Image (spheres, rainbow, N blue to C red):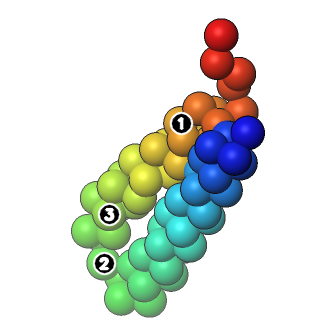
Amino acid sequence: MTNKVSLIIAGVLVIISGLYVSLGIFVYSGKENDSSGYFYLILTSIIVICGILILRKGIIKKR
């Protein structure tokens, strides 16, 4: 039970941190008129996807 809760918390934290970093990159790219921010947004989307997978692993029951 404790393992599931820790996986859920870790998944949520990874998702929130990925969204926070992507927001920072989006704002910085808009200020600087820099087009290289899209590459970093792809990398942060990978972080968010990993967070979703961790969260899913914590929610789904093991059989």
Callout 3 crowding tier (Cα within 10 Å): few <14, some 14–19, many ≥20? some
Q: Nearer the viewer, mark 2 or mark 1?
A: 1
Q: Determine which of the numbered discs, if any, sits on residue 22 in the image.
A: none
Is residue 38 placed above or below 30 in the rendered structure? above
Callout 1 crowding tier (Cα within 10 Å): few <14, some 14–19, many ≥20? some
Residue 3 in the image: state x and y as whole percent.
63, 43
**Residue ID for mark 2:** 34
Residue at the image point whose x is 28% and y is 58% from the top = 39
Quarter of the figure with the C terminus: top right
Is residue 5 placed above or below 59 in the rendered structure? below
Question: Is there a contact, CB below 8 Å, between mark 2 and mark 1?
Answer: no
> Residue lying farthest front?
2
Name the amino acid type tagged 1: Leu
Between the C-alphas of marks 1 and 3, the distance is: 20 Å
Q: Nearer the viewer, mark 1 or mark 3?
A: 1
Residue 31 in the image: state x and y as whole percent.
44, 89
The one nearer the camera, 19 or 36, is: 19
Q: Is residue 12 visible?
A: no
**Residue ID for mark 1:** 53
The one nearer the camera, 57 or 16, is: 57
The one nearer the camera, 39 or 11, is: 11
Between the C-alphas of marks 2 and 1, the distance is: 31 Å
Residue 24 in the image: state x and y as whole percent.
49, 79
Q: Earlier in the sequence, mark 2 or mark 3?
A: 2
**Residue ID for mark 3:** 40
